């Protein structure tokens, strides 16, 4: 029997609707719209498209987009100063510095300089540490989107065997922590994992985030498993994931397509994170009692 295909576009549209309703409430509460600052350094065409999409999606749900586009030869000190001014700006709730950054910039230092309360990408060491400790904080957008997709498909990770393919700070590690927080039994695989197929076959929830087209074959999937494909690979055949979709859908219980699965969730969760940051900042600023 063929797997249920999880429609990321539909789930993302639901998240945006929810966010738009929260923005209306928050705007009344704050006396201003929640604000998301984007910083695009230089003129990388792919980054420019990503940032444009993030800005227009923000405005669509009522979040104010505040944009900075410093030149590609900006110095480290100047960029840190810009981030510092956004950290201090009262009307900025979230800050997104689009990566990658030019060579002369130490990207880790720039990310680490973000106020964790405004870290809507969830990439600062503080955000990562809170997530690893199971404490509340801002969570990276793509992993948060994966959790939302699982919930939408009625998949409860509690007690389930979950296998995450990939250990990056952007996807694999935070996702493993989210699944652990949801009480799954989590295994993280990477390029040095021995007998990947055997480990993957244990998974009731299998998430592929390796950036390797065709890595997950039908033989690696436990019958009835939920398979989430984060991979985004540009090939001669167009955009493909890490999962052999046509073969795996005959074995899995539920599966995300590429495109149209995890992809649309990432921006939706950025908007959700911005609203969360605005709400949390407002609460922490409110006088106690
Ligand atoms: P990354 O930093 O390159 O990490 C890839 C991870 O996969 C690494 O941990 C690597 O292991 C592991 N890996 C690579 N080849 C493997 C293999 N043959 N077997 C087992 N593990 C293997 O990539 P990323 O930033 O996490 O992104 C992963 C994928 O998700 C990419 O295709 C990216 O484009 C996509 N992505 C999509 C979205 C979205 O919105 N849909 C967002 C972010 C990323 P080692 O650590 O041992 O090297």
Image: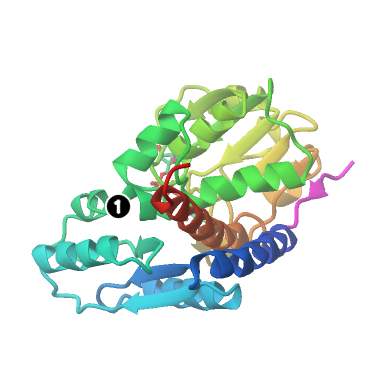
- The answer to whether any part of residue 237 appears in the image is no
Total numbered circles? 1
Q: Determine whether the residue tagged by mark 1 lies in a helix, strand or loop.
A: loop
Q: Residue placed at 31% from the left, 75% from the top? A: 44
Q: Is residue 71 on the magenta stretch? A: no
Nearest the camera: 91 or 61? 91
Seen in the image, is 212 located left or right of residue 48? right
* Stretch of the chain drawn in magenta: 1-7
Which quadrant does the N terminus fall into? top right
Task: Sort mark 1 into few (<14), some (14-19) or many (20+) by Cα contacts within 10 Å.
Answer: many
Examine the residues drawn in magenta and state their main secondary structure: loop
Left or right, residue 147 beside residue 151: left
Q: Which residue is at 54% across, 77% downward?
A: 59
Ligand 1 located in image quadrant: top left
Reading the image, the residue beneath label 1 is 115
Q: Between residues 10 and 187, which one lies in front from this camera angle?
A: 10
Q: Residue at x 42, y 27 (%)?
A: 133
The image quarter containing residue 82 is bottom left
Residue 244 percent across, percent down from the top left: 66, 48
Q: Is mark 1 within 8 Å of ligand 1?
A: no
């Amino acid at each position: 029997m063929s797997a249920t295909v999880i429609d990321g576009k539909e789930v993302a549209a639901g998240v945006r609707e929810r966010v738009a309703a929260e923005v209306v409430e928050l705007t009344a509460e704050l006396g201003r719209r929640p604000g998301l600052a984007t910083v695009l350094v230089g003129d990388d065409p792919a980054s420019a498209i990503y940032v444009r999409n993030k800005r227009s999606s923000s405005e669509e749900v009522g979040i104010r987009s505040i944009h900075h586009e410093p030149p590609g030869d900006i110095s480290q000190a100047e960029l840190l100063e810009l981030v510092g001014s956004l950290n201090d700006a009262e009307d900025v709730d979230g800050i997104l510095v689009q990566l990658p950054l030019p060579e002369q910039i130490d990207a880790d230092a720039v990310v680490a300089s973000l106020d964790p309360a405004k870290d809507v990408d969830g990439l600062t060491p503080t955000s990562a540490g809170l997530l690893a400790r199971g404490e509340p904080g801002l969570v990276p957008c793509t992993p948060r989107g994966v959790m939302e997709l699982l919930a939408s498909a009625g998949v409860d990770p509690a007690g389930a065997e979950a296998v995450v393919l990939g250990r990056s700070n952007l996807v694999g590690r935070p996702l493993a922590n989210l699944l652990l927080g949801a009480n799954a039994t989590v295994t993280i695989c990477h390029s040095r994992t021995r007998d990947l197929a055997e480990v993957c076959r244990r998974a009731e929830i299998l998430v592929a985030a390796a950036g390797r087209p065709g890595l997950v074959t039908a033989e690696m999937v436990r019958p009835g498993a939920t398979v989430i494909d984060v991979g985004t690979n540009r090939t001669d055949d167009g955009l493909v994931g890490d999962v052999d979709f046509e073969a795996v859908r005959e074995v899995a219980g539920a599966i995300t397509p590429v495109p149209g699965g995890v992809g649309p969730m990432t921006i939706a969760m950025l908007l959700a994170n911005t609203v969360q940051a605005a709400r949390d900042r407002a609460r922490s600023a409110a006088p106690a009692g």
